[in-house]
Amino acid sequence: MTAASAHAKARAARAKKTRQFVTPEGIDLELRIAGAGMRCGALIIDLFLILAVLVLFTLFMLWVGIASQSDLTVVVWMLGAFVLRNFWFIGFELGARAATPGKRLMGIRVVARDGGRLTADAVVARNLIRELELFLPLMMLGAGVAEDSVSGWIILAGVLWSLTLSLFLLFNRDRMRMGDLIAGTWVVMAERAKLNADMATQADEEGIAFTDAELGVYGIFELQELERVLRHRDPRAMREVADTIRAKIGRPVAEEDDVFLLSYYRQLKARLERGLLFGKRREDKYASD
Amino acid sequence: MIPPPPVPRATGAPGFSASRFRAEREADWIAFDRLLTRLEKKGAKGLSSEELLQLPILYRATLSSLSIARATSLDKALLDHLEALSIRGYFLVYGVRESRWARLRRFFLYDWPAAVRAVWKETIVIALIILLGALTSYSLVSSNPEWYYNFVDEGMSSGRDPRASAEYLQSTLGHGKEAAGKGESGLHIFATYLFTHNSRVSILSFALGFAFGVPTMMLEFYQGIGLGAMMAVFAGKGLGFDFGGWLFIHGTTELFAAALSGAAGLRIGTAVVFPGARGRLEAAAAAGRTAGKVMVGVLLMLLAAGLLEGFGRQLITDTMLRYAIGSLMLLLWLAYYYIPRRGDAA
């Protein structure tokens, strides 16, 4: 029963992150909100990249400056640093994939909350607010350190106040930063999934025939876990899973693990999909057959 | 005699199978994926017109496959792929509507002035706040010069305080801040510094707006205070007119931009406090979009102000000419923003 409720809880957690997003064609794309960890990871990657670009740019301008003896390079450097700092995020998010390199690596992107297109002004608004979210706590600290007259408690209050702004995304269901709120945007998952080979196409004549009762012990959740194991092709995991299934349906170890698992997978899938066609969806092994 | 109906085998293939469904449709998905990849890399120019016509057809085919697959298939990899492909496709097919050039043109012709016009009330409020700040510090400093040191810190004034002689003050109006511009060669560095610094201040005053606009108003008031205090010092030495010209040449553009950035912030603040008939989130989002446009404009204005301040002010020393350029810039901005134009959709 605990396992059953754990499954139900996991499903509910996934449903909590999924947002209805109906296209004009009437299909719900079921967008999933990107978690706080993903957002933070993407930000850190971006900041490192900006830093790296800035260092390279600085070295290059130093080299040019020394070679040409012109102080025009200082102007170029200052403007370049300004553009880099403010337009790294804006520039990338205006592109077709609406994601900075950090976001791309994490497989997330920015979308407009109302399902319309992501406009340039929304991107600008959400990224100018970032300036505040990132630097206000630092500025508070800096101001406190610079002026001795301010007491430690006031600094602490200031930092805490600015942190509530920066960590705003932890306090709402949709993981919106202050900037997302103002710009009317969301950050959602946008990973790419490769189209893998269909494991059920090959004729399953050479495999073992399972009886209906043997196939009836599992549901969709177990089927998809089995699919994951089969696609990863890790021999130890396959051995463990095969042994579990054999123990469950009471079969002796008679064939190779992968042969056994593959034919079990195919027949279980065929059985459950037939159920689907008849309007019966068995979520996991705890659901009634 | 009627033959008995064929008994379906327990594991036999039914008339419809997920595998057959996939085999039939797979080519469409692969073609769609390929088109999307090229569209992402090269934009709409990367596709021939025939391929562009294919795009919505393939998009709809993929969406239809997704809904069939959700109802009939249990292949997780297939479902994930179709979902990801549909999401990618949706945002590309519905996302791209005009070319970058058309977007830029529309921004300069309509969107930017329209957004500025939309925040006219907030602009007036912020302008009054700046004025109030300036008047407050002006009256305080002219009645008691000691107040000056409360308003302007040493580093910023660089000797321009009530103790300074009229000659010294006169000299600072001639060719700007010696500390920053070392002769004429340093001018462009100075201009760039001013631009980046002012932009950061105005971004801050915009971004602070969502805290109900209060910090924005305080920041703008503070800007006015510094201005008024400085003015009082120069006016006290009989240099008010010259100082006005020194300030006016770039000040009209810069203060206008400062007022607009404050107005953009205030717009968001008021939308959060008084959302009207809409929900608070919606109101904030709508205000944020308008304010975003205004802010792009503000950055451009500050670039112009930085150039005027760095080059114009240092090279042009005639006070009347400074006044003329300043007023001309102000008139230009006012005309650009507030004269209604034809074809103004927003």
Image (spheres, helix red, strand yellow):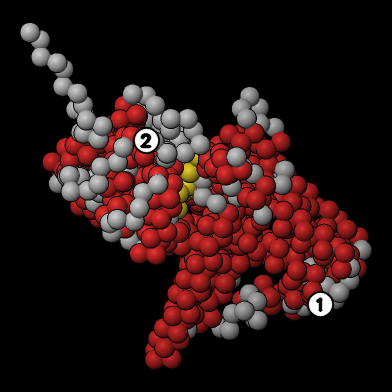
Vertical placement of residue A162 versus B31, above or below: below
Nearer to the camera, A122 or A41: A41
- Which residue sits at x=33%, y=40%? A268
Local packing at callout 2 (Cα closer than 10 Å; few below 14, some 14-19, many 20+) is: few
Residue A58 seen from this side: yes
Local packing at callout 1 (Cα closer than 10 Å; few below 14, some 14-19, many 20+) is: few
Q: Split into 4 quadrants, where in the image is the N terminus of chain B?
A: top left
Question: Pointer 2: what residue?
Answer: A213
Disc marking residue B164 = 1
Vertical placement of residue A259 versus B98, above or below: below
Dot 2 and dot 1 residues touching (CB under 8 Å) = no
**Of the residues shown, which amino acid type is indicated by label 2?**
Ala
- Which residue sits at x=39%, y=50%? A246
* Residue B12 % position (x, y): 21, 34
Of the residues tagged 2 and 1, which is closer to the observer?
2
- The quarter of the picture where residue A238 lies is bottom left
The secondary structure type at the circle numbered 2 is helix
